[in-house]
Amino acid sequence: MTERLDQFAAAGDLFKPMMEQEELLKASGLDITIIELVKLRASQINRCAFCIHMHTHDARKLGESEDRLHLLPAWRESPLYTARERAALAWTEALTLVADTAAPDADYALVAEQFSPREQVALTLLIGAINSWNRIAIGFRTPHPVAKEASAA
């Protein structure tokens, strides 16, 4: 894969609102574990190598277990995720694939049961944000770091 454009070098100032939103979402009251699981799951669905790499590493730094990271694509079949995480992951999948899912009532009901109205807004904004980041990284073919992994191979 060849990088098409360094978007930050070309127009870094245009990313300021997105970066500010990232800080607001971190301070929104959502658990940081849920934030990273949501970012990672959406990135997996979108097949964004840059973001998968980043959020896997970020989750590990926060103490996330290898099993939970490896099983994330199959979270519905694993008992390792809490009811709150399951609701967030279902909502992530529903909104990331919204053209196919139309955000089902059943998925929203799970979110409404586990999250306050303010948290529901924060979660939904988080999902929208990571989907935007994925599209930017995929569109410009942003490469993920490979130095450590390449030397181990």
Image: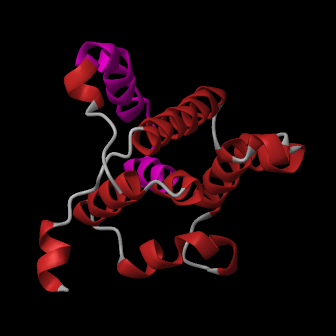
**Apparent side of residue 100 relative to residue 8 in the rendered image (left or right):** right
Task: Tell me the residue at 61%/33% (across/down).
Answer: 124
Residue 52 falls left or right of residue 127: left
State the extent of the magenta-drawn residues as a range. Answer: 11-39
Residue at image point 11% right, 79% down: 151
Magenta span: predominant SS is helix
Decide whether residue 106 is among the magenta residues.
Answer: no
Work out which residue is located at the far right of the displayed protein and give it.
105
Q: In which quarter of the image is the C terminus?
A: bottom left
- The residue lying toward the viewer, choosing from 125 and 1, is 1
Using the rendered image of the protein, determine whether residue 103 is visible from the camera's viewpoint: no
**Picture coordinates of residue 97 (x, y %)?**
72, 47
Quadrant of residue 99 within the rendered picture:
top right
Give 80 or 5, whichever is nearer the viewer: 5
Q: Which colour scheme is used?
A: secondary structure
Q: Where is residue 47 in the image (x, y as percent from the top left)?
A: 52, 58
Can you see residue 74? yes
Residue 86 percent across, percent down from the top left: 64, 60
Residue 27 part of the magenta-drawn span: yes
- Viewer-proximal residue among 45 and 89: 45
Taking the view exactly as shown, the residue that stands out farthest to the bottom is 153
Residue 62: x percent and y percent? 27, 60
